[in-house]
Amino acid sequence: MSVECWRYRLGPGSRAPGLNWTDLAAYPLVVNTRSGTTTPDSLSGRQPGRDIVTCTNFDEWLELVAAGRGIGAVPAIAVHRAPHPGVVYRDISGIPDSALYLGWRRTPPPARSVRRFLDIALPPV
């Protein structure tokens, strides 16, 4: 996942150009523990005693960020699919890679078009 795929919600003083992932180590972090890609360990060099606010779904994550409980990371698609009047999205450089998984239905067997895609996308076993 490229750096451009991540956004952050920061306070009004965050307009400085060149803001980097490591600059955020002191901010409270909102983490969606069920379906999010950010973990408390995503920020190397984080401050001891840093607040980690957890939730279990995207809607709760969005409302916690909007309420000012902390900052959070989301893929770029969330910027367009989940605009919120209380959240400002900013590009941040230096974001670590995030795992990406490919999933498909086990049964019944995948449709022919899905099988063709899987044959191309997955290395032979």
Image (spheres, rainbow, N blue to C red):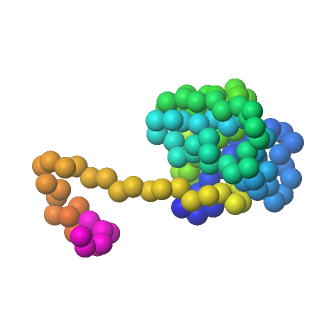
Residue at the far left: name it: 108
Question: Image height check: is 4 above or below 66?
Answer: below
At a point 56% along the width and 51% down the height, the residue shown is 75
Q: Is residue 86 magenta?
A: no
Quadrant of the snapshot with the C terminus? bottom left
Quadrant of the snapshot with the N terminus? bottom right
Query: Where does the image place residue 29, in percent across and percent down from the top left?
Result: 67, 37
Q: Which residues are magenta?
A: 117-125
Q: Is residue 80 visible?
A: no
Is residue 19 left or right of 3 when viewed as pictured?
Answer: right
Query: Where does the image place residue 87, in percent across and percent down from the top left?
Result: 69, 37
At a point 66% along the width and 33% down the height, the residue shown is 52
Among the 4 quarters of the image, the one containing residue 10: top right
Disc tally is 0
Query: Where does the image place residue 48, in percent across and percent down from the top left?
Result: 75, 37
At a point 56% along the width and 40% down the height, the residue shown is 82
Q: Considering depth in this image, is 48 or 67 the residue closer to the camera? A: 48
